[in-house]
Image (spheres, helix red, strand yellow):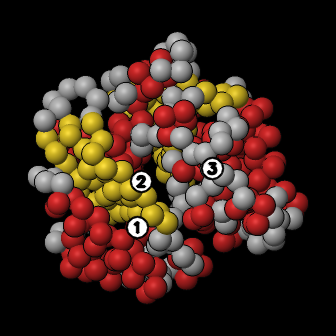
Amino acid sequence: MTRVAAIDCGTNSIRLLVADVPPEGPHTDLLRRMEVVRLGQGVDATGRLAPEAIERTRVVLAQYAAQARDLGATAVRMVATSASRDAANRADFEAMVTATLGRLPDVVAGDEEARLSFLGATASLDAAVAAHGQPAPHPPYLVVDIGGGSTEFVLGDAGGVRAARSVDVGCVRLTERHLHGDPPTADEIQRAEADIRAALADVVSTVPVHEAATLVGLAGSVTTVAALALRLPAYDPVAIHGSRIPVAGVRSVTAGLLTATRRRRALEAVMHPGRVDVIGAGSLVLRVVMDAFALDDVVVSEHDILDGIALQLARG
């Protein structure tokens, strides 16, 4: 058993997992944390990370480093994705992380981000679905990880990744580009959807999505849509992980989110405060993907790139 700490720093949130990982089989969580720091604030427009966003990230990262140390993690890896990958002042971010964590972050390319997401999502997927009394999902899997700055599409099976593509349509990026109204106007939603569909044309040029037998959805936008579709009284990771949400449920939730005001979205018991502004765009990505690829349902995973980082760190 190896105790490791994995940190995932995305465009919208920064997350920590401290886990015990055996040579084979599922890992055991000791601590999971997620804080919305909006590192990618304005980066789509300016090409730079805002100093206040770097500082918000530093404050939380310092807490994570202390918790990993206190829990006795023998190895720590921090992966940074879309926002820091795109920023002209990436060196400022890396210097902050080195000073706070004692090591450089791994600013990974989209393909590596996709591989880690696939590993984390599929490692214990059968058991999660079985816990809901449903038959095991069939491979090949199309894993879709909707982040703040980008969305990863990964096709694979037990043998690993067959094809992957990362495209710049994340919930923060789309919100900043298009969804400015409260609620968004029909024209704003139409422009966002056109952006997503253009990105999907790039996806199908690389990833044979028609071969997928099961869609697996990851990250906070997807899990929040699932919580709303399941009508949970409070956010419940156990109820969400391995659940299967039909496309009709995704369409209904997305329509509700995009026609609700910010205040109305904030009243949802399952809504994290940091997702209120961007959940409409995140749900729209999921809905457009399912419609464009004629997918009947989505299997929702609470395990994603964070779990992939931990597994790879422990097992090599």
Say if 225 sits above or below 193 in the image: above
Instruction: Write down the residue under mark 1.
Output: 85
| Crowd rating for badge 2 (residues with CA inside 10 Å; few <14, some 14–19, many 20+) | many
Please tell me in which quadrant of the rendered image residue 266 appears: bottom right
Q: CA distance from mark 3 to mark 1?
A: 30 Å
Kindly report which numbered mark, 3 or 1, lies closer to the viewer in this rendering.
3
Which residue does the numbered mark 2 point to in the structure image? 110
Looking at marks 1 and 2 on the same chain, the residue that comes earlier in the sequence is marked by: 1
Question: For residue 123, what is the image quadrant?
Answer: top left
Rounded to the nearest angstrom, the CA distance separating label 1 from label 2 is 9 Å
Residue sitting at x 13%, y 54%: 72
State the image coordinates of residue 97 (x, y, percent, origin top left): 27, 74
**At 81% from the left edge and 71% from the top edge, which residue is drawn?**
181
User: SS class of the residue under badge 1?
Assistant: helix
Total marks in image: 3
Kindly identify the residue that appears in the image at 35 percent across and 22 percent down.
158
x, y (%) of residue 57? 39, 74
Front position in the image: 164 or 214: 214
Name the spot of residue 301 as percent of width and height, x first. Answer: 49, 36
Which one is in front, 191 or 27?
27
